[in-house]
Amino acid sequence: MRHYTATHWGIYEVASEGGRPALKPFAADPSPSPIGLSMLDACTSPNRVMRPAVRKSVLRQGLGAAREQRGCEPFVEIGWDEALDLVAGALKTTIAQRGNEAVFGGSYGWASAGRFHHAQSQVHRFLNALGGYVRHTESYSLGAAHVIMGHIVAPMRELTASHTSWDVLRTHTKLFVSFGGAPWKNSQVSPGGVGRHTLAASLRAMAAAGTRFVNVSPVSDNIDTGGEVEWIATRPNTDTAFMIGIAYVLYTESLHDRAFLQSHCVGFERFAKYLEGADDGQPKTPEWAAAITGVPASRIAALARELAATRSIVTASWAMQRAHHGEQPYWMVLTLAAMLGQIGLPGGGFGVGYGALNMVGSAEPRYGGPTLSQGTNPVKPFIPCARIADMLLHPGETFRYNGGEHRYPDIDLVYWCGGNPFHHHQDINRLRRAWHKPSTIVVHEQFWTANAKMADIVLPATTTLERDDIGQSQRERFIVAMKKVIEPVGESRHDFAIFADLAARLGVHETFTENRSEREWLRKLYEDCHPAAERAGLRLPAFERFWADGLVDTEAPAQSVVMLEAFRQDPVANALKTPSGKIEIFSERLEGFGNDDCRGHPRWYEPVEWLGSAKAQRFPLHMISDQPHTKLHSQLDHSALSLANKVRGREPIMVSDTDAKARGIADGDIVRVFNDRGSCLAGARVSAAIRPGVVKLSTGAWWDPVSFAEAASLDKHGNANVLTIDVGTSALSQGCSAQTCLVQLEKFEGDAPPVTAFRPPVLERNEP
């Protein structure tokens, strides 16, 4: 029998080489991701958290001691019983004295592909068993989109799973216009695992069938069709203005579909007045858009006519909405597609995620897979995901979100399990200040990341390779029996085992475990998803057969998808879940929310900082921070694949020939990237594939300040989020605005400080 495991970036076969396990690409995957191949070595690296560890001041003086020393002082390794007693005591005291509203349950969804040992589900289930916790909504990836799209067309989760499939695009699409590309590197992943990577072959098949591609983006390397792609190099954060310029031409030249706008949409007349300039006296002509975007007016106008002349689809990457006013480009993509009248037609309409996940565009059957219930959370206070620093720094202050007014809770204990806030949060130096506020920070970690170094108590957790689990993802044909590959490293334990022991100490063991073992839970989760699979026309084998075989191939026939096809055919019988049941180009609900930064129809709002702002005089380069191709966020940054991509040990930064020459920078130089929020060192990659005035520093480098004790200390490793801005996209969604970021660049002179990101802190043993 073959042995398999699953990760977010793919299924891997487990082989034996010289008596040791080795990971090999999955034979059925036409384009396997290389990321997981170096996972085994990374899991046994010297920076593993081997034993429970407590910050020295906390062990000597008690919880809450010397909070400003987080990240600076040694840790003391202690036994599991002592560590669990300490954590249980902190939870019990905090809840007794300040209530469950003082506990924040931190996690992020990419922790594990396994559906049982999914850190977010485990920590939330545990905290709910204790009476609840302060939660977060949405995600850093899609904070703006999740809120806006539900108001104007359909929930983002529904759209993501129902994009028009690649086979339909190949057959029908004549013009594919992407704002932000459709990058292969991002599509390496899907939550729960990828069976067959399809993006690369799908784009090539479309090109071979005659589809023409236009990429509107500051970089040209974020879409690869194997053929010609027209690159329109636009300024970052100006895509909304570009699309409004297109809309003006469609409207004034009567190229818009009046019948579709009348039958399937509401509010176009209000938007048309905006195009004419009725609101502000400024018609939104291609010339107006050209001044903002840096793209010739003639090309904007011509693209409008090209879109109207053929079967076309307009798409936007997820990065578009991770910017100040990030709701607007998604609203405009929908509006453009509605004006063209091709929504619900094969090969036409819009896309908001091609290239973001492997599942987007998949024709595989869709059904709900194994899922661990998180229980019920009775605690009402919450925060939008990207507002954690605001919550910690400003307890009691009000914030607006999705039409309501809410108040930040006063958090005294942070429990983090899965994810690394010192990677994915913006303005890390600000987060560092916020991290001094809670009395207690507990972290489950596998490696000595900055998240672990900034904690009070660190509990060593197993990796995917050290436990049994089930891998499954929507729109993927395989279910994987993720059998343990290696024994737990050091004294690490499964999150489930850790929480079960804590639950026993706190009197909620039965509530948390339901008296089931790990294997019993795996069986239950697998069997619970059988009805959903049967409704999708799939029959799954019994658990014993599944576990023995190691893999289920549903072998279901492809089910071609046309997004919103049923709605187009009958907008009454298949009404949308919007207030009107139609596509809302003008939204009475959103207008009624009264947010000046997100009114009732899409419009151009000037970002808080961009290349057209006064701040660009001091920081004349717009930095984009995309997903790296050698890791998922910061996972496996210490792997061989990730390390091989670095420049003299630092994360690479792409810079144009023009900007490099103006600063005396050569390819391979160490450079300092800085603004008024922070600074970091990176390795220059000089390229013609990026617009002058723009630099690209991918996320994922583990934060590595010269000093954890100093405010705004130089990051030695190239962590983009020491530079990004920590403001919400708008009062509507409060999403992440990472792509709105101005910086300056200079060659670093002298000896660069060594990278220490992968070194554990000073560790002492607790002597009796």
Image (tube, grey):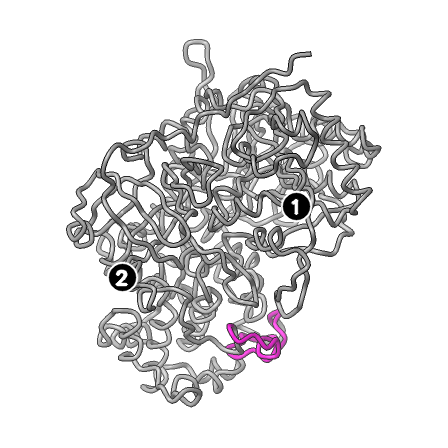
> Camera-side residue: 631 or 417?
417
Q: Quadrant of residue 588?
A: bottom right
Residue 577 shown in magenta = yes
Residue type beneath disc 1: Glu
Residue drawn at x 32%, y 40% is: 681
Residue 468, disc: none
Distance (Cα) linking label 1 and label 2:
39 Å
Instruction: Say few, some or many: other residues with alpha carbon within 10 Å of mark 1 (under 14 / 14 to 19 / 20 or more).
Output: few
Which residue is under mark 1? 534
Residue type beneath disc 2: Arg
Q: Is residue 445 visible?
A: yes
Q: Are marks 1 and 2 in contact (CB under 8 Å)?
A: no
> The residue tagged with tag 1: helix, strand or loop?
helix
Span of residues in magenta: 576-597
Mostly what secondary structure, the magenta segment?
Answer: loop
In the rendered image, residue 532, in percent from the top left (x then y), is placed at 66, 47
Q: Is residue 23 left or right of residue 366?
A: left
> The residue tagged with tag 2: helix, strand or loop?
strand
In the rendered image, residue 426, in percent from the top left (x then y), is placed at 47, 51
Which residue is under mark 2? 212
